[in-house]
Image (cartoon, rainbow, N blue to C red):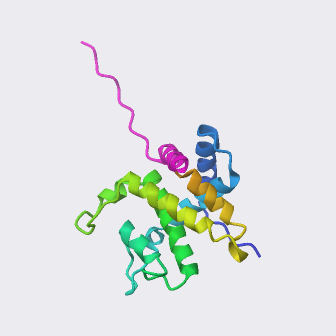
């Protein structure tokens, strides 16, 4: 029995394909499908901050997410938990950098540090690379996808920026000023 698709998945599949393949020339159906599912997942705001602290509160700062993913010095209870958290960090960094960069500027009172684009890129590439290194047993089939996401992270961000432009609100048309 196949899992039911998210109702927005066909819409996001088309938007991502238009931007990634049509505008960037990035012909990778696995990456396109993954990014479309990522947009579906993050269309529900609760999914943006899946990494939790010991008290179960969502972790909103990137550096704290990374620390929580460490199974040796952090709070990840296992290497499987590290993989899941690193996957989420890669997804989070890709989404924020490409679709919603101004999110890092909101809630200023609650955030001690707002990551730069360079920090998001570094965290996303590194996290997807780490996920790609889980390449045995049940993760063997997915590992190459995460290696490609890591290698093409900047292009994926650009592709999401193009998706945002395509599906985002249009600026109102303005009439040119009258010449007197």
Q: Which residues are magenta?
A: 154-180
The N terminus appears in which quarter of the rendering?
A: bottom right
Magenta residue check for 178 = yes
Q: How many marks?
A: 0
Q: Is residue 138 visible?
A: yes
Position of 33 relative to 53 (above/below) = above
Could you tell whether 152 is left or right of 50 in the image?
right
In this rendered view, identify the residue nearer to me: 140 or 60.
Answer: 140
In this rendered view, identify the residue nearer to me: 6 or 112.
Answer: 112
Magenta residue check for 70 = no
Position of 22 relative to 118 (above/below) = above
Position of 36 relative to 17 (above/below) = below
The C terminus appears in which quarter of the rendering?
A: top left
Residue drawn at the location 54% of the way across and 59% of the way down: 39
The answer to which image quadrant residue 21 occupies is top right
Q: Position of residue 135 (x, y in %)?
A: 68, 70
Residue drawn at the location 68% of the way across and 72% of the way down: 139
Residue drawn at the location 39% of the way across and 86% of the way down: 54
In this rendered view, identify the residue nearer to me: 162 or 115.
Answer: 115
Farthest-out residue, front: 72
Q: Position of residue 93 (x, y in %)?
A: 46, 60
Q: Position of residue 112 (x, y in %)?
A: 26, 67
Q: Is residue 60 visible?
A: no
């Amino acid at each position: 029995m196949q899992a039911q698709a998210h109702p927005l998945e066909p819409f996001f599949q088309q938007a991502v394909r238009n931007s990634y393949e049509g505008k960037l020339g990035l012909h990778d159906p696995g990456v396109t499908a993954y990014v479309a599912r990522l947009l579906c997942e993050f269309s529900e705001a609760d999914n943006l901050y899946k990494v939790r602290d010991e008290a179960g509160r969502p972790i909103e700062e990137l550096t704290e997410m990374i620390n929580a993913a460490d199974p040796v010095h952090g709070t990840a209870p296992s290497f499987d938990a590290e993989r899941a958290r690193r996957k989420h960090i890669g997804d989070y960094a890709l989404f924020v950098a490409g679709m919603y960069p101004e999110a890092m500027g909101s809630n200023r009172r609650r955030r001690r540090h707002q990551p730069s684009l360079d920090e998001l890129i570094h965290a996303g590439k590194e996290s997807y690379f780490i996920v790609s290194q889980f390449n045995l047993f049940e993760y063997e089939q997915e590992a190459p996808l995460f290696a490609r996401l890591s290698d093409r992270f900047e292009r994926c961000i650009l592709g999401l920026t193009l998706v945002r432009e395509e599906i985002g609100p249009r600026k109102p048309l303005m009439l040119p000023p009258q010449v007197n």
